[in-house]
Image (cartoon, rainbow, N blue to C red):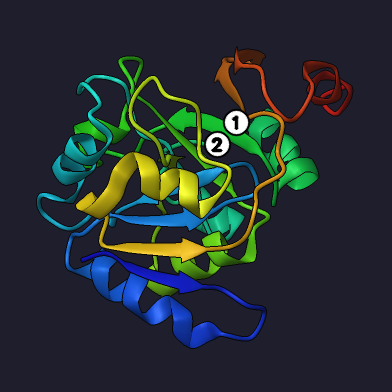
């Protein structure tokens, strides 16, 4: 049976079941600044495979990550272009995913065909707290079956995923109108991969 915890401002102990599940290679649902996410500890054997099964997602589409800090986010990149650092300084914590050249050794499920890994620092305290407690980023794919709308409430996530998830962390209703904006970098050029919560014009204005 899945565990459900209601997160309040000072209920740090409510994270304990989720952290235990992550360390055991299980899948959790947790709140982010956009929608609810599906989290696993990618360093645990079998965890990413379990995530794909829970989401009914075909392998081949890389899974993005959420980190607690910019330093943690950049630890999964073998290089960080100056433009990426400028955008991170402006928009992190927040709904901006940067696709950066992945360090060697990351699981294939996290790395795109061009060798990039997507990562952001969430502005939701629970997402950051989980990553901080783990000591590494956690997966950030949306808490829904592949192709379905993202979950804005814990009840929507539970209706879609049922007992395939070990722990549900209830952070209330997510009010985002769009997912995180995703950008990548090609030399000195910044390229939008997915339109989202941060407008493309705002990105370009901060790169001038």
Q: Residue at x 42, y 36 (%)?
A: 64
Mark 2 element type = loop
Instruction: Identify the residue under disc 2.
Output: 80
Q: Is residue 27 above or below residue 135?
A: above
Q: In which image quadrant can residue 50 be found?
A: top left
Instruction: Identify the residue under disc 1.
Output: 81
Instruction: Looking at the picture, tell me which residue is in the foreground, 16 or 4.
Output: 4
1 sits to left or right of 29: left
Q: Is residue 133 above or below residue 101?
A: below
Residue 200 pos. (x, y %): 77, 17
Q: Residue at x 50, y 33 (%)?
A: 150
Instruction: Looking at the picture, tell me which residue is in the foreground, 190 or 14.
Output: 14
* Residue 171 disc label: none
Mark 1 neighbour density, 10 Å: few (under 14) some (14–19) many (20 or more): some
Mark 2 neighbour density, 10 Å: few (under 14) some (14–19) many (20 or more): some
Q: Residue at x 61, y 52 (%)?
A: 122
């Amino acid at each position: 049976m899945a565990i459900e915890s209601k997160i309040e401002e000072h209920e740090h102990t409510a994270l304990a079941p989720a952290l235990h599940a992550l360390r055991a290679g299980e899948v959790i649902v947790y709140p982010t600044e956009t929608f609810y996410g599906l989290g696993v500890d990618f360093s645990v054997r079998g965890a990413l495979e379990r995530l794909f099964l829970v989401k009914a997602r075909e392998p081949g589409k890389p899974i993005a990550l959420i980190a607690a800090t910019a330093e943690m986010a950049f630890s999964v990149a073998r290089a960080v272009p100056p433009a990426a650092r400028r955008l991170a300084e402006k928009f992190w914590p927040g709904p901006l995913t940067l696709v950066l050249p992945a360090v060697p050794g990351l699981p294939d499920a996290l790395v795109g065909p061009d060798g990039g890994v997507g990562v952001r620092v969430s502005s939701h305290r629970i997402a950051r707290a989980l990553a901080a407690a783990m000591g590494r980023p956690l997966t950030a794919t949306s808490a829904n079956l592949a192709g379905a709308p993202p979950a804005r409430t814990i009840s929507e996530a539970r209706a879609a995923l049922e007992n395939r998830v070990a722990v549900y962390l209830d952070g209330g209703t997510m009010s985002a109108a769009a997912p995180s904006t995703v950008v990548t970098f090609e030399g000195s050029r910044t390229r939008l991969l997915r339109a989202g919560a941060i407008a493309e014009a705002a990105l370009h204005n901060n790169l001038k």
